[in-house]
Image: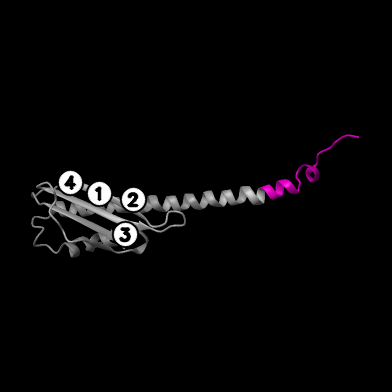
Amino acid sequence: MKNRHGFRNGFGMGQIMAMLLVVLPTLAFVLTLMIDYWSVMQEDYKLKLIANQVSQVLDGEQDLRAANLNATLNGSINNICPRGTTLSFSTPQDAPTLGQVSVVIQYVHNGAYFKNKTLSTQMQTYSYHDQNISITGTCQ
């Protein structure tokens, strides 16, 4: 009598249980982790874009003390924040170096796997008009 392995004999209950208990949960975990990591990377990209635009606005200002910075900055940049959050800025301080513009943008990510992780980006440039400012923006 020949030993024939058909579908019924070769693919038994053990293989089905292994697939249901090991392979599918692992696949679900990996996919959810990748989606959460992708959203972190997208949020980080948006923070870098905001920091770049804030630096450009501040570099071009001739008098940073006279301008209403929150209105100027929030007018064109506010709707870039991740997940519909709004951008608010701290009180501007003097940067450590004369003629330097220092911008820090922060956001707290709450995803499936990366919970309460603060994403932050910093950009330092030199002012065209020798202005001196350090400002922190937060997407909340």
Dot 1 amino acid type? Gln
- For label 2, the residue is 45
Residue named by callout 4: 125
Determine the CA span between mark 3 and mark 4.
22 Å
Marks 4 & 1, CB-CB < 8 Å contact: no
Residue under the image location 22 percent in, 56 percent down: 136
User: Along the polypeptide, which appears first: circle 3 or circle 4?
Assistant: 3
- Between 104 and 70, which is closer to the camera in this rendering? 104
Corner quadrant of residue 72:
bottom left
Residue for badge 1: 122
Sequence-wise, the earlier of marks 1 and 3 is 3
For marks 1 and 2, the one nearer the N-term is 2
Which residue range is magenta in the image? 1-18
Amino acid bearing label 2:
Tyr
Amino acid carrying label 4: it is: Thr
> Are dots 1 and 3 in contact, CB under 8 Å?
no
Frontmost of labels 4 and 1 is 1
Q: Is residue 5 magenta?
A: yes
Q: How crowded is mark 2: few (under 14 residues within 10 Å), some or many (20 or more)?
A: some
Q: Regarding mark 4 in the picture, which secondary structure is present there?
A: strand
> Any magenta on residue 86?
no
**Secondary structure found at label 2:** helix
Give how far across and how far down residue 134 sits, in percent: 17, 53
Q: Residue 81 carries which label?
A: 3
Residue 7: image tag:
none
**Depth order, front residue of 13/52:** 13
